[in-house]
Image (spheres, rainbow, N blue to C red):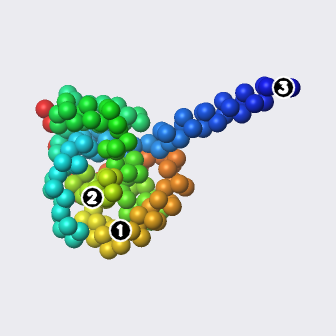
Amino acid sequence: MNRFPLKIAGIAVALTMASSAFAGDQYVDPTGYAVSGYDVVAYFDLAQNPVGTAQPQAVPGDKDITSTYNGATFAFSSEENKAKFDANPDAYLPQYDGHCAYGVAKGGKVPGNPHLWRILDGKLYLNITENVVGFWEEDIPGNLQLSEANWVDIENDSASDRAIPQFESPAPVN
């Protein structure tokens, strides 16, 4: 019995599984940081406002407190938040590699603005503009269903190289 084809098949499956964990590129804006240098862990400690109202401002990360994950640098406001991220990055990463959730629902990758966020079922979602937040919030369940379905087809596409409209990040600080 020739085991060579089985070994090749096993290696192919392992490579496919390993590459799928890091399939898409994180959106990184001109700051050079994922989520424009804001602390992804800090979102989960902010009070979330009701649908139809603005969320609190994101918490800037510190350029001296960083981690690299999925080819992108993330900045944190404290060593404690960095440790939480390092222990379980998937719990804090923005969905769709930091791209706009509504953009993904419409079938494309556009930047996500770190100040236009919402946490749903323990997951962080970003949107690109205030107008887009309104469209997203008109039907969050329906838009999530579309986003999840579309993400399968566009996840491996290159990250957006567009700037976030009318946004300039002062983060990370220090």
Residue where numbered disc 2 is placed: 118
Which image quarter: residue 9? top right
Image quadrant holding the C terminus, namely top left
Residue at the image point whose x is 27% and y is 58% from the top: 118
Look at label 3 and name its amino acid.
Answer: Asn
Residue reaching furthest to the bottom: 138
Q: Is residue 112 left or right of residue 71?
A: left
- Residue 132 placement (x, y as % from top left): 31, 67
Q: Circle 3 sits in a helix, a strand or a loop, which is it?
A: loop
The tally of labels here is 3
Image quadrant holding the N terminus, namely top right
Q: Circle 2 sits in a helix, a strand or a loop, which is it?
A: strand
Give the Cα distance between marks 2 and 3.
54 Å
- Residue 112 placement (x, y as % from top left): 32, 54
- Residue 24 placement (x, y as % from top left): 47, 44
Residue where numbered disc 1 is placed: 140
**Residue 168 appears anywhere in the view:** no
Q: Is residue 117 above or below residue 141?
A: above
| N-terminal-most mark, 1 or 2 | 2
Q: Residues within 10 Å of mark 2 (few under 14, many from 20)?
A: many
Residue where numbered disc 3 is placed: 2
- Residue 97 placement (x, y as % from top left): 40, 47
| N-terminal-most mark, 2 or 3 | 3
Residue at the image point whose x is 38% and y is 34% from the top: 69
Residue reaching furthest to the right: 1
Q: Residues within 10 Å of mark 1 (few under 14, many from 20)?
A: some
Given residues 45 and 25, the one toward you in this image is 45
Q: Is residue 70 left or right of residue 64?
A: right
Marks 1 and 2 close (CB-CB < 8 Å): yes
Give the Cα distance between marks 3 and 1.
53 Å
Q: Is residue 103 left or right of residue 1?
A: left
Give the Cα distance between marks 1 and 2.
10 Å
